[in-house]
Image (spheres, rainbow, N blue to C red):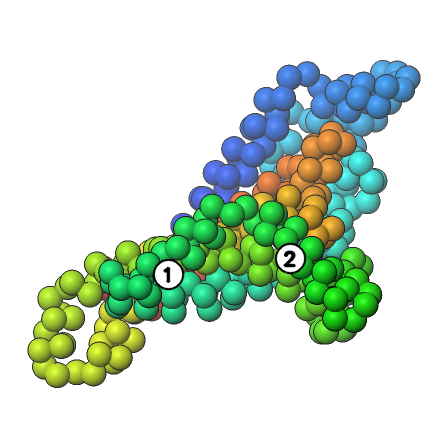
């Protein structure tokens, strides 16, 4: 197991280096000079000295190779530079929003797992019964309904319900507080976007769980276990479910990494100041250094999540680590 983990860790290094090279190259493929584009976008007067100062601040006055190694050295020290928009260190700007986005992603993943695994398993075990049809309808509805529309319906439901019961409309809080400072306030703010996002998330995972369970339940070792007289619950839990989890874990990992920076519309609906909103603002304000840092942050999250998925693979299926 330790050798398997070491191999996966060593694969992270070239993957991260290749991703950094791709992000760095794509940003430099933007037509024109970044400093000229930024200053021209403001509509104000600027001279050549201002452009040169901007190039020195961004490091674009260096050769391309020097810029790349400076970029890599900054990544190793978690120094993403200074925002061209706010003038603040990018790491501090990201830290304010990463905590919120990470918590929403974790809560949505928990909601999705608690919904998807039981429903997908029951749907597979009760194939072609009314339970199976009901679960399939729920999962199809989750895929068809956009999470932001569900979020709007949740907000309207909270307003109408609180107005009817208490006579005063209630809305989720707007100002973010960490969960360790005020758990009730924090959960009352983030549980609703987590439910709206987790429902769609769970719909995909439910269908994957069902299809994987149906395939596993037809395997010879499951029929043999039943022929030996083992309890059906024991067969499902210990033999079938564990082997069916590999594709489900893949879907869960990919969706979790996407949630870190991909909830742009949902954050707008619930007025959350997360990474998705910061992505849009950095592009609108021509903040190329911030955009580059956010893309690399999402890349690192994807790489880390894929590493954890590989570890889960080895834990669930010993043949993977022994091979």
Residue 32, how many percent across, how many down? 68, 16
- In this view, the residue in front, 104 or 33, is 104
Q: Is residue 246 left or right of residue 263?
A: left
Residue 189 seen anywhere in this rendered image of the structure: no
Displayed quadrant of residue 62: top right
> What residue is rendered at 36% in x and 56% in y?
136
- In this view, the residue in front, 59 or 30, is 30
Residue 117, how many percent across, how many down? 39, 66
Displayed quadrant of residue 96: bottom right
Q: Residue 41 carries which label?
A: none
Give the structural element (helix, strand or loop) at label 2.
Answer: helix
Give the structural element (helix, strand or loop) at label 1.
Answer: helix
* Alpha carbon distance from label 2 to label 1: 22 Å
Residue 41 seen anywhere in this rendered image of the structure: yes
- The residue where tag 1 is placed is 134
Displayed quadrant of residue 292: top right
Q: In this view, does 208 lie to the left or right of 42?
A: left
> What residue is rendered at 51% in x and 47% in y?
145
- The residue where tag 2 is placed is 154
Give the quarter of the figure containing the N terminus.
Answer: bottom left
Give the quarter of the figure containing the C terminus.
Answer: bottom left
Q: Residues within 10 Å of mark 2 (few under 14, many from 20)?
A: some
Residue 160, how many percent across, how many down? 72, 60
- In this view, the residue in front, 132 or 81, is 132
Q: Which of marks 2 and 1 is nearer the N terminus?
A: 1
Q: Residues within 10 Å of mark 1 (few under 14, many from 20)?
A: few
> What residue is rendered at 58% in x and 56% in y?
196
């Amino acid at each position: 197991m330790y050798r398997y983990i070491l191999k996966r860790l060593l694969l992270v290094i070239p993957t991260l280096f290749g991703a950094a090279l791709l992000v760095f190259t794509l940003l430099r493929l933007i037509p024109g000079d970044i400093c000229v584009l930024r200053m021209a976008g403001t509509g104000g007067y600027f001279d050549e000295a201002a452009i040169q100062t901007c190039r020195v601040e961004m490091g674009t006055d260096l050769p391309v190779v020097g810029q790349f190694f400076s970029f890599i050295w900054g990544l190793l020290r978690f120094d993403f530079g200074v925002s061209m928009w706010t003038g603040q260190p990018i790491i501090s700007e990201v830290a304010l929003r990463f905590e919120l986005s990470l918590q929403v992603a974790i809560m949505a993943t928990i909601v999705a797992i608690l919904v998807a695994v039981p429903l997908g398993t029951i749907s597979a075990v009760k194939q072609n019964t009314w339970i199976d049809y009901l679960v399939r309808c729920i999962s199809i509805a989750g895929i068809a309904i956009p999470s932001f529309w569900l979020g709007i319906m949740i907000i309207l439901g909270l307003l109408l319900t609180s107005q009817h019961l208490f006579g005063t409309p209630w809305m989720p809080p707007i100002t973010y507080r960490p969960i360790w400072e005020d758990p009730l306030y924090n959960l009352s703010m983030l549980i609703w976007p987590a439910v709206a996002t987790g429902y769609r998330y769970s719909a995909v995972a439910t269908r994957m769980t069902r299809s994987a369970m149906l395939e596993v339940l037809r395997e010879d070792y499951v029929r043999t276990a039943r022929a030996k007289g083992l309890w059906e619950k024991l067969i499902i839990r210990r033999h079938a479910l564990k082997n069916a989890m590999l594709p489900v874990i893949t879907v869960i990992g990919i969706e979790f990494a996407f949630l870190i920076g991909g909830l742009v519309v949902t954050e707008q609906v619930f007025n959350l100041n997360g990474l998705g909103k910061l992505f849009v603002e950095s592009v609108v304000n021509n903040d190329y250094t911030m955009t580059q840092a956010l893309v690399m942050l999402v890349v690192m999250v994807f790489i880390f999540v894929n590493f954890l998925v590989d570890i889960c693979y080895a834990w669930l299926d010993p043949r993977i680590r022994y091979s």
